[in-house]
Amino acid sequence: MTGRMNRSQLRENIFKLLYLSGFNSEDEMGSQMALYFEGQDVVPSGKDQAYIEKKYSKVKEHLEEIDRLLNETSEGWKTSRMGKVDLAILRLAVYEMLFDEDVPVGVAINEAVELGKKFGTDDSSSFINGILGKLAKKADA
């Protein structure tokens, strides 16, 4: 079944691809992405799939800077020590907060917290909220 997705569904798919990329080389991600889309209950429309792939690529383009900011902000929790779910959520949220003018900072944080509740551990949502809140304050300063 193909259907149009709302922004939260689009964001969830981008998060899942970022999570997958933690287990695959960049060379493998093209075929992994195709398999991922085929395996969905609701297959994204062509327009939605293009949006998901484009935003995934943009997050990956800024990954070095995003990780540097996360490492500066998360005291005692370097990206190398973070769980892969939390890290994928944080990377997407930081990208949206700093580089995506279509997404207000508050929305990026709220959506990240919701993804944490849905896919992370019991501590994920508060961990994510804490780091993104600190980052938002630093950005405003």
Image (cartoon, rainbow, N blue to C red):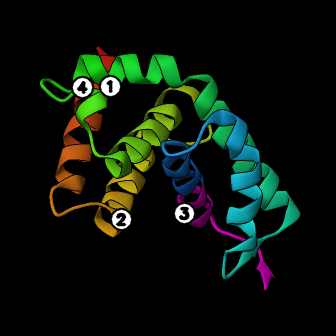
The percent coordinates of residue 141 (x first, y second) are 28, 13
Please report whichever mark, 2 or 1, sits nearer to the chain's N-terminal start.
Answer: 1
| Image: 133 above or below 129 | above
Please report whichever mark, 4 or 2, sits nearer to the chain's N-terminal start.
Answer: 4
Give how far apart the Cα atoms at labels 1 and 4 are. Answer: 7 Å
Residue on which the image places disc 4 = 78
Q: For residue 25, what is the image quadrant? A: top right
Q: Residues within 10 Å of mark 2 (few under 14, many from 20)?
A: some
Residue on which the image places disc 1 = 70
Residue on which the image places disc 3 = 8
Query: Which of the two marks, 3 or 4, is nearer to us in this view?
Result: 4
81 displayed left or right of 12: left
Residue, x 72% and y 63% (percent of image)?
A: 35
Residue, x 74% and y 41% (percent of image)?
A: 54
Magenta residues span 1-13
Give how far apart the Cα atoms at labels 3 and 1 are. Answer: 23 Å
Give how far apart the Cα atoms at labels 2 and 1 are. Answer: 20 Å
Residue 119 marker: 2
| Tag 1 near tag 4, CB within 8 Å | no
| Tag 4 near tag 2, CB within 8 Å | no
> Looking at numbered disc 3 in the image, what kind of residue is underneath it?
Ser
